[in-house]
Image: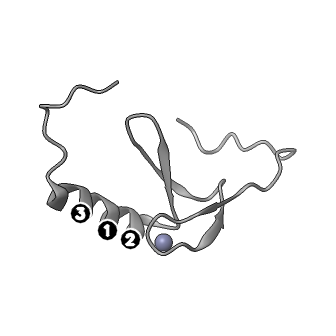
């Protein structure tokens, strides 16, 4: 993935940070790829919080098969 190939003609799509719900342009948002979806984050801080929550939830084990 290269985030340098930003299409100047693309509309400024706004997304919400998964953690603090800040509205941010999709072009600058940090992303975390889930099994079948993508979460957006305003920065690495919120991304780190999300990853911590995933680990605490203990849902990262390999017993479940991805779709
Ligand atoms: Zn945030």
Give the quadrant of the C terminus: top left
Asked if labels 2 and 1 touch by Cβ distance under 8 angstroms, the answer is yes
Q: Secondary structure at mark 1?
A: helix
Nearer the observer: mark 3 or 2; the answer is: 3
- Report which residue position mark 2 lands on: 45
List the residue tagged with mark 3: 52
Residue 14 placed where, x, y %? 70, 60
Say whether mark 1 is within 8 Å of ligand 1.
no
Which residue is nearer to you in this view: 52 or 63?
A: 63
Callout 3 touching callout 2 (CB < 8 Å)? no
Q: Position of residue 50 (x, y in %)?
A: 33, 62
- The way the protein has been coloured in the rendering is one colour
Residue 2 image position (x, y, % from top left): 57, 38
Which numbered disc, 1 or 2, marks the residue closer to the eye?
1
Is residue 4 or residue 18 the one in the foreground? 18
The correct choice, above or below, for 15 with respect to 11 in the image is below
Q: Are marks 3 and 1 in contact (CB under 8 Å)?
A: yes
* 15 sits left or right of 41 in the view: right
Residue density around tag 3, few if under 14, some if 14–19, many if 20 or more, within 10 Å:
few
Residue drawn at (64%, 66%) of the image: 24
Side (left or right) of 24 relative to 61? right
Q: Which residue is mark 1?
A: 49
Residue 11, given in percent of the width and then of the height, sits at 83, 50
10 Å crowding of disc 2: few (<14), some (14-19), many (20+): few
**What residue is shown at x 39% (from left), y 62% (from top)?**
47
Q: Does 50 appear above or below 6?
A: below
Q: Earlier in the sequence, mark 3 or mark 2?
A: 2
Q: Secondary structure at mark 2?
A: helix
């Amino acid at each position: 993935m290269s985030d340098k190939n930003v299409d100047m003609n693309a509309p400024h799509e706004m997304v919400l940070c998964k953690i603090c719900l800040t509205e941010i342009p999709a072009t600058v948002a940090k992303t975390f790829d889930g099994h079948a979806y993508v979460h957006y984050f305003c920065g690495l801080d919120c991304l780190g919080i999300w990853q911590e929550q995933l680990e605490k939830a203990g849902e990262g084990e390999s017993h479940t098969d991805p779709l």
